[in-house]
């Protein structure tokens, strides 16, 4: 049966009314019967909040406001489109940088103007065939059932459709990585590379090395891959991530500079560059990157008040106090009535006013900072808390600073990058190694708690082990190690004791918490597989 647009819900996003009409007429000529139009990015997002679209045809350049890439990013971020939707970016530009920038956000396809009805239909047909073929896998993943997704993928591989084999092998290897089955993923990538030189398989091997903490080996693989495939943007990100794991921020900066020369519109990459350049003391590069972030953030779902604060901090470092205050004023305007923005602004004003010799204003800003920090409680992002600590230390509010440091270290003791940021901050203000004793004591306490909990678990004393971790999580609510260990105990408890819906719900909530605090998917994947097996077994009994 031939592919038809009849019954497909289609959204056209195009600011040019002439081309918008041409697109609509083209679609009607292809038997489309449900077509919605939007003439800018905001209208497109609004349309997607009200209706579920099968196809989105979005121009890249939409005049003022969001561009097509930002529309796609927000639609994905807010889950306004799902695995069934075909999203096509369209542009009149054909330069390598324009195409690369558009493809960087990974739309299903990219079309250059002009194109005809047959070209459009051919592209859409190809993507719907692919999505329909993989629908069982994607549907399982959307439900969070990794085990079922793997079963569906294995079943399709068993059928042996040669046209889809490479796509299926790529998907199967990615599922294996998500499940923490690195041996299976490595075998797939190696088998693929024995047949054909495919960049995604080489990158997969680098990802496995990275996840296995073979960072140097991962870097060598990513470097070689980038050298052979300089347009493979995702590889730059992995290479930067690997250098960051080694705290080599000069290398992180260099890699991101290369990537942004090719695709300068990536706000997340610009943020990473700003942070890396700042840490390297390359203030000129950091300023340029922060300015790009602020500009891109105006219409991006990834923009935040922290971007303005980063730029203002940079100005404060170079004694450009007037520029710092202007940036904070712009932040207040952009993020009016947002307590986090007000906290970030008042924190910086303490130091800026002090540098200007305005001690009374500095003191007022400090008072406001402390009040906001107390009222916001645990809603304050950890980087903003670190800024408050720094301000308190420089303002002789050591009691408040030490209390906050204690809580921050306990809450983030397994986040080595954050601990390095904390160490860096203290070194910058002449307090080198100030918190090192507390950090080491907290690490030892966590290890002791973990060892005791695991010992109780192995002895079959599940309730005692769980109670121990419950107590620990009161002081370390976002500790990944504790959350993972609690999940292990809960799943084992559900397995060996009578299945209890209350415990089951608690396990589900722990999985949600683990995702929320950023536990690596491959660490969660093993537990998700075990839990899914348990649930299937339980459902089979009823």
Image (cartoon, rainbow, N blue to C red):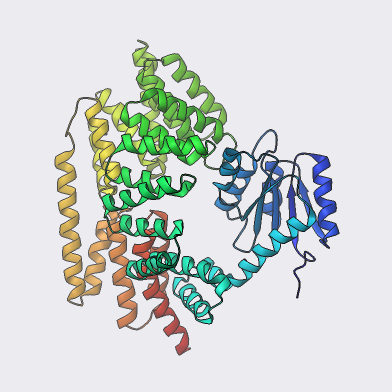
From the top left corner, tell me how far across and down residue 88 is, in percent.
Answer: 66, 52
Does residue 446 lie above or below 394 as drawn? below
Q: Is residue 124 above or below residue 258?
A: below
Given residues 240 and 62, the one toward you in this image is: 240
Picture quadrant where residue 317 is located: top left
Please indicate whether residue 49 sits to the left or right of residue 334 in the image. right
On the image, which quarter does residue 493 sit in? bottom left
Residue shown at the point (30%, 70%) measured from the top left? 488
Q: Furthest residue to the bottom?
A: 541
Give the camera-side residue of 227 and 540.
Answer: 227
Residue 59 falls left or right of residue 451? right
x 49%, y 27%: residue: 291
Percent across and percent down for residue 290 are 46, 29
Tell me the quarter of the image containing the N terminus. Answer: bottom right
Residue 367 appears in view? yes
Q: Is residue 268 left or right of residue 462?
A: right
């Amino acid at each position: 049966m031939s592919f038809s647009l009849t019954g497909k819900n289609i959204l056209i996003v195009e600011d040019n009314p002439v081309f918008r009409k041409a697109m609509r007429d083209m679609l009607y000529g292809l038997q489309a019967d449900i077509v919605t139009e939007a003439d800018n990015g905001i209208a497109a997002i609004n349309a997607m909040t009200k209706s579920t679209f099968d196809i989105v045809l979005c121009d890249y350049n939409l005049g003022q406001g969001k561009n097509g890439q930002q529309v796609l990013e927000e639609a994905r971020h807010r889950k306004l489109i799902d695995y069934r939707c075909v999203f096509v970016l369209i542009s009149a530009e054909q330069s390598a940088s324009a195409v690369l920038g558009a493809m960087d956000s990974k739309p299903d396809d990219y079309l250059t103007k002009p194109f005809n009805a047959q070209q459009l239909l051919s592209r859409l047909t190809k993507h719907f065939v692919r999505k329909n073929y993989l629908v069982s896998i994607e549907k399982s993943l959307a439900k969070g059932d990794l085990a079922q997704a793997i079963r569906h993928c294995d079943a399709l591989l068993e059928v042996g459709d040669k046209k889809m084999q490479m796509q299926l092998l790529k998907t199967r290897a990615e599922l294996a990585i998500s499940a923490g089955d690195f041996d299976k993923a490595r075998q797939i990538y190696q088998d693929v590379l024995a047949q054909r030189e495919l960049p995604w398989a080489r990158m997969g091997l680098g990802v496995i090395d990275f996840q296995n903490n073979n960072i140097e080996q991962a870097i060598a693989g990513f470097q070689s891959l980038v050298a052979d495939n300089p347009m493979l943007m995702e590889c730059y990100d992995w290479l930067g991530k690997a250098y960051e794991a080694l705290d080599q921020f000069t290398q992180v900066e260099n890699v991101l500079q290369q990537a942004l020369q090719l695709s300068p519109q990536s706000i997340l990459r610009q943020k990473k560059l700003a942070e890396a350049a700042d840490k390297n003391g390359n203030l000129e590069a950091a300023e340029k990157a922060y300015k790009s972030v602020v500009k891109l953030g105006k219409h991006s779902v990834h923009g935040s008040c922290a971007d303005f604060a980063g730029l203002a901090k940079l100005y404060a470092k170079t004694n450009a106090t007037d520029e710092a205050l202007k940036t904070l004023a712009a932040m207040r305007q952009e993020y009016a009535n947002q307590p986090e923005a007000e906290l970030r602004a008042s924190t910086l004003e303490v130091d800026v006013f002090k540098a200007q010799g305005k001690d009374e204003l500095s003191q007022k800003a400090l008072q406001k900072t402390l009040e906001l920090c107390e009222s916001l409680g645990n809603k304050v992002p950890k980087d903003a808390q670190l800024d408050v600590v720094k301000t308190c230390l420089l303002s002789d509010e050591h009691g408040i600073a030490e209390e906050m440091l204690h809580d921050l270290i306990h809450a983030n003791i397994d986040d080595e990058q954050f601990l390095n940021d904390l160490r860096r901050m203290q070194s910058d203000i002449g307090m080198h190694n100030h918190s090192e004793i507390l950090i080491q004591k907290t690490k030892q306490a966590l290890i002791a708690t973990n060892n005791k909990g695991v010992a109780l678990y192995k002895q079959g004393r599940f309730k005692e082990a769980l109670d121990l971790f419950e107590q620990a999580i009161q002081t370390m609510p976002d500790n990944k190690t504790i959350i993972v260990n609690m999940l292990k105990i809960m799943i084992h408890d559900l397995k060996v004791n009578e299945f209890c819906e209350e415990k089951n719900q608690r396990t589900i909530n722990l999985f949600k918490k683990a995702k929320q605090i950023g536990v690596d998917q491959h660490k969660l994947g093993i537990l998700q597989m075990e839990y899914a097996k348990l649930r299937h077994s339980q459902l089979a009994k009823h």
